[in-house]
Amino acid sequence: MRNIGSFDYIIVGGGSAGCVLANRLSESGAYRVLLLEAGGRDRNPWIHIPIGYAKLFKNKKLNWLYESEPEPELLGRRIIQPRGKVLGGSSSINGLVYIRGQKEDFDGWRQRGNIGWSYEDVLPYFMKAEDQARGADDFHGVGGPLAVSDQCETHELCDAFIAAANALGIPKNDDFNGAGQEGVGYFQTTSRRGRRCSAAVAYLRPARRRTNLHTVTHAPARRILFENGAAIGVEFSHHGEICRAMAAGEVILAAGAFASPQLLQLSGVGPAALLKTHGIAIARDIPGVGENLEDHLQARMIYRCTKPITLNDDVAHLTRKIGISLRYAVKRMGPLTISAGYAGGFFRTDPRLATPDVQVHFINFSTTKMGDKLHDFSGFTASLCQLRPESRGSVRIKSADPAAPPAIQLNYLAAESDHRTMVAGLKLLRRIMQQAPMRPYIAAEHEPGEQCTSDEDLLQHVRARGSTIYHPTCTCRMGEDAMSVVDARLRVRGLAKLRVVDGSVMPSVVSGNTNAAIIMIGEKGAEMILADAAARPALKAAS
Ligand SMILES: Cc1cc2nc3c(=O)[nH]c(=O)nc-3n(C[C@H](O)[C@H](O)[C@H](O)COP(=O)(O)OP(=O)(O)OC[C@H]3O[C@@H](n4cnc5c(N)ncnc54)[C@H](O)[C@@H]3O)c2cc1C
């Protein structure tokens, strides 16, 4: 086994959180940092062109393409779970929508005993990360690594959707990340001048010349090495060779909501019974590792459009396609710059609720499945997801082989309250679509279709066609209770020198898209790690 040396910090996973950590921990020059990433560099040009996300859904080189176990409430279907396998991780293949979540999400985290994670506590880290194109205000920062921009242009269909929601009394909201989330409007995107701003572009590129940051790609971690209850290094493979790296300071897992718990379990940290089944020696029995999996289930409504103004029409005509490419090449504008939600909204399905419980992503194209080719008719899509589902799933290893994917069980719709919210959300969405501003654009409801009328029909549509909106989280939940895995400083309970800093530590999924909150977690996690190192003079002296 080749030993590649000793570092102060070893970060496993160069995704949204991992890139933030790599930058911030190497910033001062005082610490030697190793970043291990299972995938390769972000050279594929489609990563950097915003609409490229649609091309990357099925790219096995850049995408782990996990598959869930059969989902009992979704007619036993296995649901594809894309995750980035490349520098930047899922932020290199995601839909670019910039949403932070609701103030109440973070206050809820704090309310569960997680000191330092209330909205007031986390807002400065969102702002520190941000380079907001509209400029700074009470909620937004400028000069941070992560570029946040408006869509480069409006679209007739999005305008009609916004007006239709307004006609139903839903207010316009020009900033879903500002004073309040409720309402309808255009999404902002993580992009700069028509190019994707992934975590790798934002955080890793500026740091790549630092001599104290060592990045190894094609280096999947196999297990964490322990001695006397403390993490001391990581074993990984690299082009067929088994290697190890030692950590004088800490090992930090940032491999995401599926791979971080998987790696803990492979290393003997997890539910004792599961580890015993696979003959893995127990380093620490932590029952919550891999449990409490949360995700947002989406159900799409697809419409045939009366006018040839959709992206489906653009790509069907060679001259329009060439025009789009030229416009992007020359001006960095046009359909190639749009995010996975062009416009959208946050709605309450019940007026008695304090905050929105569903989100809609509205987009000017349609496909049968995500990542498929566009329909050959003029079409557009409104997708609905429930923001705070009660159903919980799990991630559990199926074997002691690090190369074998874990069993991922989402248990979508396991809770009956989730049925009600999805059905109520679809009914609300339909009412929006029936308002006067939208009517001239709708030739027919293609999916689920006008024959689908009762609540039971709508639920059946969700069961038959629902899929993930790519927000798996909470599998190494932060907290104080018996099922929590890390404490509020993101340290794995009962083990020294080991943290998890990624989407898996969320105590509950945020009410919105997850990338911004995970970058915030990376910023806050890095600050905690550096503060703890400063209080530990031995590490400073060793560096
Ligand atoms: C298709 C898609 C669309 C999305 N759209 C949006 C959106 O529009 N807006 C939004 O806010 N969010 C979106 N998300 C979600 C968001 O991008 C993710 O929640 C976020 O990027 C996850 O960050 P993370 O750091 O937890 O994990 P990731 O970014 O997934 O990073 C984990 C990294 O660890 C690496 N890794 C895994 N195992 C190992 C190992 N054993 N050794 C070494 N490295 C390993 C992976 O290759 C990866 O690079 C989307 C996600 C997907 C997949």
Image (cartoon, rainbow, N blue to C red):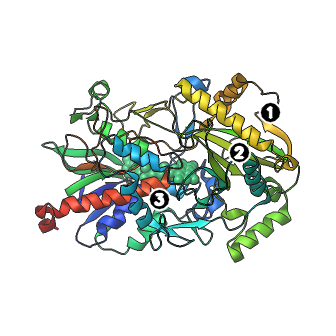
Residue at disc 2, secondary structure: strand
Q: Are marks 3 and 2 in contact (CB under 8 Å)?
A: no
Q: Residue at x 69, y 41 (%)?
A: 369
Residue at disc 3, secondary structure: loop
Dividing the picture into quadrants, the one containing residue 203 is bottom left
Find out if the beta carbon at label 3 lies less than 8 Å from the nearest ligand 1 atom: yes
- Mark 3 packing: few (<14 Cα in 10 Å), some, or many (20+)? many
Horizontally, is 375 left or right of 94 in the view? right
Q: Which residue is mark 1?
A: 449
Mark in front: 3 vs 1: 1
Nearer to us in this view, 173 or 189: 173
Mark in front: 3 vs 2: 2
Can residue 245 be seen here? The reply is no
- Mark 1 packing: few (<14 Cα in 10 Å), some, or many (20+)? some
User: Which amino acid type is marked by label 3?
Assistant: Gly
Horizontally, is 207 left or right of 457 in the view? left
User: Which amino acid type is marked by label 2?
Assistant: Ala
Can residue 450 be seen here? The reply is yes
Distance from Cα at disc 3 to Cα at disc 1:
38 Å
Q: Earlier in the sequence, mark 1 or mark 2?
A: 2
Distance from Cα at disc 3 to Cα at disc 2:
28 Å
Horizontal and vertical percent position of residue 143:
45, 74
Nearer to us in this view, 194 or 234: 194
Horizontal and vertical percent position of residue 346:
61, 47
Residue at disc 1, secondary structure: loop
Horizontal and vertical percent position of residue 167:
76, 48
Q: Which residue is mark 2?
A: 382
Horizontal and vertical percent position of residue 372:
70, 45
Q: Residue at x 29, y 61 (%)?
A: 527
Q: Which residue is mark 3?
A: 88
